[in-house]
Image (cartoon, coloured by chain):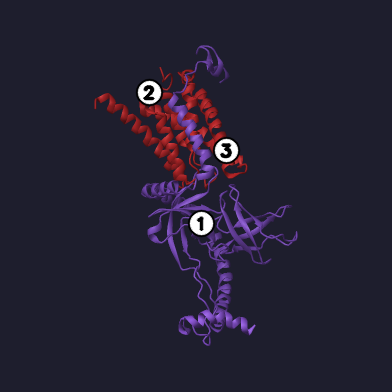
Amino acid sequence: MRTALFSAGHGDGLRRSERPPTSLLFFLAFSIFMTVFSLYGANASVFEKARATLLDRFAPVFSVFSGPVRFTQNRVGDISDYFAVMEENRQLREENEALRIWMHQAMALEQRVAQYEEMLDPKVVRPGEYIPAQVIAENGGPFSRALVLSAGGDDGVRKGSAVINGAGLIGHVVTVGSHASRVLLLTDADSHVPVYIEEVDTEGLLSGTAERRAEIRLFSGRPKGELQPGMRVVTSGTGGTLPRGLPVGEVVRISDKGVATIGLYSSDQRAHMVQVVDYVFPKTIEPIVEEDALPAPAELGDDAVASAPEAVAADG
Amino acid sequence: MDDRHFASLATVGVAALLLLLGIVLLLVPLNLFSGTVPTPILPLCIIFIYGLERPESLPPSLSFAMGLLHDLLFGAAIGPWASVYLVVHALVVWQRSYFAGRDVVVLTTGFAAASVLAMALYWFEMSILSSRPMPVFAIFWQWVVTVLSFPFLLALFRRLAGRPRSNSLV
């Protein structure tokens, strides 16, 4: 190879070069300029619109390509399942027994919670609906972790909506087209999701690392050793974009600096079908009106309204 | 429109379609070997091969446009993939005379060198954009898979283009 690379017989080796055309150098310089510009304007509306439009245009192409791929993967999966069917059957029986116990406990708790809610009438915010969607594409880049879904704005998907599969939260929607949308996965370096660790009653920010894992940085300083592996992590709902309580994962490791690595519930389950959580944070707050409240200013007349501060001052 | 002009447009169209196919394949959930092997970045191979074999069919504007399309379809920053495509394009045009008539091993080594520079630029750009150094292993592994797939694509291209295995430039 060395001979082939540097030997004679082909003239003067690497010195035999042609200057790239000016247009090539111009486009290269322009693309680097655009990258620098992306530092400040990557989320500009014109780019967002271009991304959404392209997503819509290419969604049918992704569906056509991903169909046979999914079919093949499923058949290969079926064959491997066939060889593991006995062991899997035993595991499923055990899991089914455990789940049956949990189901009865959950039903009892659900009934009790319903009674308490009837007594207290709390204003609990609930996710509205779940929009089913198929994964038609995945980002195959070295750093970015994202999916493309077959549901878009016409189906009720909104920017920021949480996306879950059977195991838990997998990410949130960042681009919405009419018929397709892009989901940023929890492991993407640009993903930041507010979460809540139940056992220690504290909130933190779950950030992706681009290495197929996610880490939590806590909002408040917690004593070292308080976080323990196995603690459950759910969405906190802070910021109002995601609903509270969606299962995310559990703490698997805590570094000396207090950064907790999270084992995501959804990480070992390859997403084919997912659900977009149609959730809107209540922005209007109904004022509490007492039955014996003072009459409205309109009923008192203008004079009464004007003299009200004076009356208050006289009372004081 | 005369026949020659139409033919040159058609070859540019074929190059564009191949690049588009390479980009779409990067987005299709192939999950090679249960997801342990990343999808090779085929557009880089296609640009290098066209730069060697049919430079007239790959204008710089096409590499730039396809790079932008790659960026937009990935939903990330605008420009990094365009610059990666153009670095590979510039390097292969720069050394085209040297590569003329060389063995596949030499061409693969040349592609490895060009693509490692381009991927290093991508790593640098993404690190700047993310304000932290990005992990090296993921990009290195994808580069290895891309380089390994290059000889097969070159052979396929030459077979489809009806050219002999050696000395295809002159």
Are there few (<14), some (14-19), or many (20+) residues within 10 Å of tag 2?
some
Mark 3 nearby-residue class (10 Å; few <14, some 14–19, many ≥20): many
Residue B118 relative to residue B160: left or right = right
Residue B37 seen anywhere in this rendered image of the structure: no
Could you tell me how far apart the alpha carbons at marks 3 and 2 are, in whole angstroms? 36 Å
Q: Which of A303 and A37 is in front in this view?
A: A303
Three-letter code, disc 1 = His
Instruction: Say how many tags the image has.
Output: 3
| Residue located 59% across and 59% down the image | A194
Marks 2 and 1 sit apart, C-alpha to C-alpha, by: 49 Å
Chain for disc number 2:
B
Residue A172 - label? 1
Going from N to C along the chain, the mark reached first, 3 or 2, is 3
Q: Chain B is drawn in which colour?
A: red
Mark 2 element type? loop
Q: Which colour denotes chain A? A: purple
Q: Position of residue A177 (x, y in %)?
A: 40, 53
Where does label 2 land, which residue? Answer: B163
Which element type, helix, strand or loop, lies under badge 3? helix
Residue A212 shows in this picture: yes
Q: Residue B50 location in percent, x, y?
A: 42, 28
**Chain hosting mark 3:** B
Q: Is mark 1 on a helix, strand or loop?
A: strand
Q: In which quarter of the image is the N terminus of chain A?
A: top right
Instruction: Name the one closer to the observer, B130 or A44.
Output: A44
Q: Which chain is indicated by disc 1?
A: A
State the image coordinates of residue A53 (x, y, percent, origin top left). Answer: 39, 48
Residue that carries the numbered disc 3 in the rendered image: B123
Measured in 3D between alpha carbons, the distance from the residue under mark 1 to the one under mark 3, in whole angstroms, is 25 Å
Amino acid type at circle 2 is Arg
Toward the right, the furthest residue is A224
Which picture quadrant has residue A23? top left
